[in-house]
Image (spheres, rainbow, N blue to C red):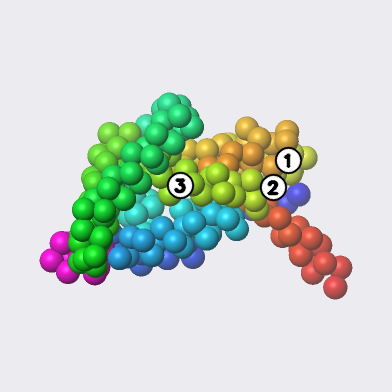
Amino acid sequence: MESRKPRINVARRTRQWLLAPLVVITLAFGWRYPLVGFIVPLVMVIGLIGGVIRGRYVCGNWCPRGSFLDRVVSLVSPKRPIPDFLRGSAFRWTLVAVLMGLMVYRISLNPGDIMHWGRVFWMMCLITTAIGVSLALFLHPRAWCSICPMGTMQNALGGHKHQLKIDASACTSCGLCARACPFGLAPVEHRDHGIMEDRDCLKCAECTAACPVGALSWPGEQDKRGSEQAA
Ligand code: SF4
Ligand code: SF4
C-alpha cells in the first residue's frame, strides 16, 4: 500500500468550531432566557438516536460540548492519560443514575412550568460543563467524555456498530493513529483483530486521516474504492 502524508479531518474540525459557541450561548443566556436550556434535551435526543445507529458518532462529530473541549479547552489542557477508573462501567453507570436522577428530581419540583424545565436543563449543562472543563484543565480535554452519561448510553446502545476497520497487513505500527485520537484511544493496539473493538471510539475519523498508509477505513469504504477502481 502506498504511503501518503498524514492529514487532519478538516470538515470535522470546521464543524466543531461552529458548534462550540453553542455551549457558551446556552450557559450565558440560559438562566435569563430559560427556553435556551432546551438546547440540552435536543442534543440528548440527537445523541440517543445517533447512538442506536453508530454508537458515539454524535459525541465525536456533532456534540457542542465535545466540540468546545476539542477545539477550545484542549489548547490549554496538559493532555495527561485518562485514568482507567474513569473508563470503567461501575463509575460511569453510577454517574448516569446520579445525574439523570438529579435532573428528574429537579423537574418534579415544578413539572407544570416550562420555564422551570429550561432552568433545570441549564443547570445540568452548567454542572457538567464545569466538571468537564475542570477535568480538561488538569487531565485530558476529553476526560469528561469518558464519564458523560450521554456517552455511556451511546456506548451501550451502538458502540459495536460501524466499527473502524484495521488492515493489519498494511499497518506499520507507527502509532500516528493513537497520537491523532482526541479520546486517547489507540487503534494500532487492535490491529490483530482487524477492527477497533473499543465501544468508546468516537468515529471521528481523525485516525483515518492521520494514518500514512491508509490502513484504517470504515465499513463499506474499501468495497466502494474497489468498485471505483474496477469501473
Ligand atoms: S493504523 Fe496506526 S499504527 Fe498502523 S500504520 Fe496507520 S497510523 Fe500507523
Ligand atoms: S480511534 Fe479514530 S475514530 Fe475512534 S475516536 Fe480515536 S481517532 Fe476517532
Q: CA distance from mark 2 to mark 3?
A: 21 Å
Residue 22: where, in percent of width, then height?
30, 64
The answer to whether the beta carbon of the residue marked 1 is less than 8 Å from any atom of ligand 1 is no
Badge 1: how crowded within 10 Å, few (<14), some, or many (20+)? some
Check disc 3 and report its element: helix, strand or loop: helix
Q: Mark on residue 151?
A: 3
Q: Earlier in the sequence, mark 3 or mark 1?
A: 3
The answer to whether residue 219 is seen in the rendering is yes
* In the image, residue 28 lies in the stretch drawn in magenta: yes
Residue 42: where, in percent of width, then height?
38, 65
The residue that label 1 is drawn on is 194
Which span is picked out in magenta? 26-37
Task: Name the outermost residue toward the left.
Answer: 32
Q: Look at the magenta stretch and give its main secondary structure.
A: helix
Q: Mark on residue 208?
A: none
In this view, 152 is above or below 37: above
Q: CA distance from mark 1 to mark 2?
A: 6 Å
Q: Earlier in the sequence, mark 2 or mark 3?
A: 3
Tell me: 139 left or right of 161.
left
Q: Residue at x 49, y 56 (%)?
A: 48
Badge 3: how crowded within 10 Å, few (<14), some, or many (20+)? many
